[in-house]
């Protein structure tokens, strides 16, 4: 059973929709690497917000970084802090930083793409119309980040 009490680490508490309600987490950035063997679009969140959440629950995820038309077909992942125990794969980036890329899945476990997360735009400039909010079930111990009420679209072949 999920625990929705306000969790604090130090003096940082996660913001909530209402008193004692669903926590709100917003993206802090978006990165994609088209030259990788398997390109992905990676969304980041604030590690302090993530660590202040209980081990399992539901959150409102505010996506403030739209994907470009090129990134629309890439599988979407969320980069989470790796300080907690998890079963998700952890890799070391070129800069020697530990990266925990968790796949974003839909309600039946299919991998979401960039176009499933937010509306693709022509460039990476922030556009208010491309901002979206999603209800997400998460489990830190098992590495689940599941969008509720969404179904992944059929992936199209990436353009060369």
Image (tube, rainbow, N blue to C red):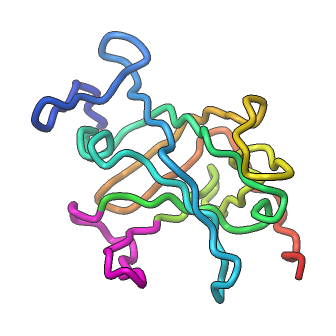
Quarter of the view holding residue 20: top left
Count the numbered circles shown.
0
In the image, 5: left or right of 40?
A: left
Q: Write down the region rendered in magenta.
A: 82-101
Q: Is residue 53 magenta?
A: no
**Where residue 108 appears, x then y in whole percent?**
64, 55
The residue sitting at 47% across, 64% down in the picture is 102
Toward the left, the furthest residue is: 10
**Where residue 122 appears, x then y in whole percent?**
86, 51
In the image, 47: left or right of 61?
A: left
Q: Is residue 86 magenta?
A: yes
**Where residue 155 appears, x then y in whole percent?**
82, 67
Q: Is residue 139 above or below residue 89?
A: above
Look at the magenta stretch and give its main secondary structure.
loop
In the image, 56 versus 122, the foreground residue is 122
The residue sitting at 81% across, 65% down in the picture is 70
Assign the N terminus to one quadrant of the image: top left
Quarter of the view holding residue 4: top left
The residue sitting at 59% across, 45% down in the picture is 147
Assign the C terminus to one quadrant of the image: bottom right
In the image, 156 versus 11, the foreground residue is 11
Q: Is residue 86 above or below residue 135?
A: below
Toward the top, the furthest residue is: 19
Quarter of the view holding residue 33: bottom right
The residue sitting at 87% across, 70% down in the picture is 156
In the image, 95: left or right of 156?
A: left
Q: Is residue 89 above or below residue 42?
A: below
């Amino acid at each position: 059973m999920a625990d929705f009490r306000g969790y604090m680490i130090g003096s940082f508490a996660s913001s909530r929709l209402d008193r004692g309600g669903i926590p709100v987490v917003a993206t802090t950035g978006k990165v994609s690497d088209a030259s990788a063997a398997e390109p992905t679009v990676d969304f980041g969140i604030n590690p302090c917000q993530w660590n202040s959440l209980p081990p399992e629950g539901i959150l409102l995820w505010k996506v403030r970084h739209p994907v470009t038309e090129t990134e629309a077909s890439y599988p979407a992942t969320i980069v989470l802090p790796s300080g907690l125990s998890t079963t998700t794969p952890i890799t070391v980036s070129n800069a020697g930083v530990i990266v925990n890329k968790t796949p974003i899945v839909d309600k039946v476990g299919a991998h979401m793409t960039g176009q499933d997360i937010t509306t693709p735009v022509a460039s990476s400039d922030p556009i208010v119309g491309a901002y979206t909010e999603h209800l997400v079930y998460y489990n830190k111990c098992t590495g689940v980040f599941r969008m509720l009420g969404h179904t992944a679209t059929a992936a199209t072949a990436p353009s060369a």
